[in-house]
Image: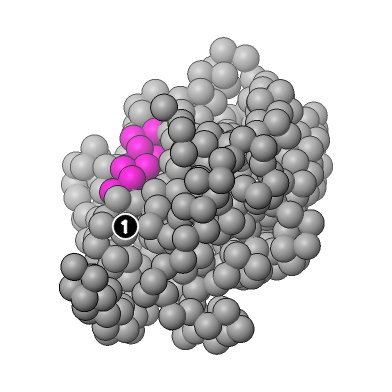
Amino acid sequence: MLTGKKRWLYIAVPIFFFWFFGQIDKLGISIIQTDADFLSDLGITGENAKIGFITFIFTIAYAVSNLFWGVIIDKLGARKTAMLGLVVWTITMITAGLSTTYEMFILSRIVLGLGEGMMIPVCGKFIANWFHYKELGKAQASWLSGNYLGPAVGALMLTAIIASLHWQAAFFLLAAFNLLLVLPLFYFLTRDTPEEHKGITHDELSYIREKNPVDKKDESKSFAQDYRYWIVWFGMLMSSFLFFGISIWLPTYLIEAKDFSREAMSSITSLSWLFALGFVLICGYLSDKTNRPSLMATILFALTTIFLCGGIMSPNAIIAGICMGLAMGTQGGVFHLSNLFIVKFSTPETAGRAAGMMGFTNIMGGFASYIMGYLRDLSNGDFGTSIIVLIFASALGFVAYLFTLKRESAELRVIHNNQSIVS
């Protein structure tokens, strides 16, 4: 079954679980921060700005570390970098579970952010080195599926663990998954390039290395010289603000603003992550099929604006919750397309740095979490003002991508003309 397709086992499987558990490590805090014992133990009950600061400081560390991880990965290789990061994650999960003060927990989140900052560059490097140009969309979707399926499962899993045990147990369990499952997958299955892997045949290697006949990319030209890269970079700033703003505060929004029970909250939260997974899979298929990723990103930002308006205007709690989940889901699609652009606008040699620069945009996620908490404090716990800020961010993302459509349309005509000549 895997003849000629072993790259999907050796690379797609490890990076799927890499993100599956990495995202639970990162975003499981949205569930944990709704637990009264967690808030009480850290002394932050009712202090929304301090709660938002947990994600703020994590994403600051995460975003800044992307800048140096990209360079390290291009020098050290994706495999060793991933394993180093996994060891760091394991230690920080244990430290978080042992935290007895707010300051100690914050320190664990800073170190976790520094360790997880290599996730996007690692995957960008693996995808650039291991996959054929016609399957980049599906290859990106393989790890982005873990990016959203992980929190979907994690929302239910963490809710059950906290209800039956304690919030500390959630961190210890995540540490065990990283150490006993994900780390061995990278050690035994992956190599930095297919040329280094004994399981890759000559035929599969030749297929991977086949050049795109219509790719006119100048290998000597830096990705930083392509204006479209910076439009995507700005789009990712907005997407990060939207995604973290919604995902971190969604469970609290459902419980405090819409009076959902904890069980109903976890169901809607899990469904929201499944929406994101659905948009990733759809974008993975359509981006390879249509060659119009910029148009798709433009549409996704427009849909985000519509869904956020539905979330703030709908009088029905369930519809409002689902609209917020769909808004988060559309940004899952934008994230997928942005990582596709990283590979498109860079070379295998510079993919780590290009992804590192793109990963820096996660810094806006931290501001989103903190700003939403701060605005809630100013509004006596109301979410209205903070959601309006999210709507403004989605509108900016929509406008930015409009400037990519003309160039993309011209490239598509070149592709069709070349196909006509060949046929």
Total marks in image: 1
Name the one closer to the observer, 99 or 363. Answer: 363
| In this picture, residue 20 sits left or right of residue 121 | left
Residue that appears at 51% across and 65% down: 343
Residue at point 53% right, 83% down? 218
Tell me the quadrant of the picture where the N terminus can be found.
top left
- Residue position marked by numbered label 1 in the rendering: 288
Q: What is the quadrant of residue 225 in the picture?
A: bottom right
Instruction: Classify mark 1: helix, strand or loop.
Output: helix
Residue at (66% x, 25% y) in the render: 181
Q: Is residue 274 magenta?
A: yes
| Residue at left offset 62%, top offset 48% | 194
For the C terminus, the quadrant is: bottom left
Residue 140 shows up from this direction: no
Relative to 307, 96 lies left or right? right
In the picture, residue 349 is in which quadrant? Answer: bottom right
Q: From the top left corner, tell me how far across and down residue 251 is, in percent.
A: 44, 39
| Magenta span of residues | 270-282
Percent x, y of residue 99:
79, 34
Sort mark 1 into few (<14), some (14-19) or many (20+) by Cα contacts within 10 Å: some
Q: x%, y% of residue 230?
A: 50, 80
Q: Is residue 162 in the magenta section?
A: no
332 displayed left or right of 154: left
Whether residue 318 is visible here, answered yes or no, is yes
